[in-house]
Image (cartoon, rainbow, N blue to C red):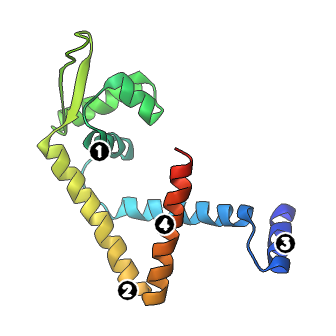
Amino acid sequence: MHEESERYEESERSGDPTAEQVAVDLTAVVRKLVRRLRTTTPDSRLTPSQRSVLARLDGEGPSTTAALARAEYVRPQSMRLTLGALEEQGMVERTPDPDDGRQSVVSVTDAGRSTLAAVRAAKQGWLSEAIAGELDGAERRALAEAAVLLDRLVERGE
């Protein structure tokens, strides 16, 4: 608690928030936003990890189980379970890897794309309504500027 108090005292003296203060506040609000966006999605029967894999396949194209596991920071066994559930629901399909017959390549199906589109539309719809209903023009401009800054921070880490 003492550390937090010092952060805010320093911020009050200088008039500008410290990087640490902004990081703490931003982490908290992003966590709440992500949680809120998850609750707005239609009942797609997908877990967050399944949605993440489906979105990755949709955005980056077909991939092997091993490559997906590395990209999602999970064990290959966990990825096999996730892909099995997606395949069972008809969201992904496997084809033999042309370069290595021991592996298969996983790709998103039309049903997977459709489900992903519905999930994305629900999230964007809720957020658009919240922005329109809560923020005036100046606040929307400030939020748009903040989005550009956040994107810059994210891109820096990649």
Are dots 2 and 1 in contact, CB under 8 Å?
no
Q: Which one is earlier in the sequence, the residue at label 1 or at label 4?
A: 1
Q: Which one is earlier in the sequence, the residue at label 3 or at label 2?
A: 3
Q: Which one is earlier in the sequence, the residue at label 2 or at label 1?
A: 1
Q: Along the horizontal axis of the image, is 134 left or right of 116? A: right
| Of residues 60 and 24, the one drawn nearer to the viewer in this rendering | 60
Residue named by callout 2: 133
Residue at point 56%, 66% (across, down):
29
Residue type, label 3: Glu
Residue type, label 1: Gly
Q: Secondary structure at mark 2?
A: helix
Mark 3 Cα shell of 10 Å, populated few (<14), some (14-19), many (≥20): some
Above or below, 150 relative to 8: above
Q: Which one is earlier in the sequence, the residue at label 3 or at label 1?
A: 3
Q: CA distance from mark 2 to mark 1?
A: 31 Å
Residue at point 72%, 66% (across, down):
21
Q: Nearer the viewer, mark 3 or mark 4?
A: 4
Q: Which one is earlier in the sequence, the residue at label 4 or at label 2?
A: 2
- Identify the image quadrant of the N terminus: bottom right
Residue at point 46%, 81% (across, down):
141
Query: Residue 53 at what x, y percent from top left?
Result: 33, 39
Residue type, label 4: Val
Residue named by callout 4: 148
Query: Residue 134 at what x, y percent from top left?
Result: 43, 85
| Of residues 116 and 149, the one drawn nearer to the viewer in this rendering | 149
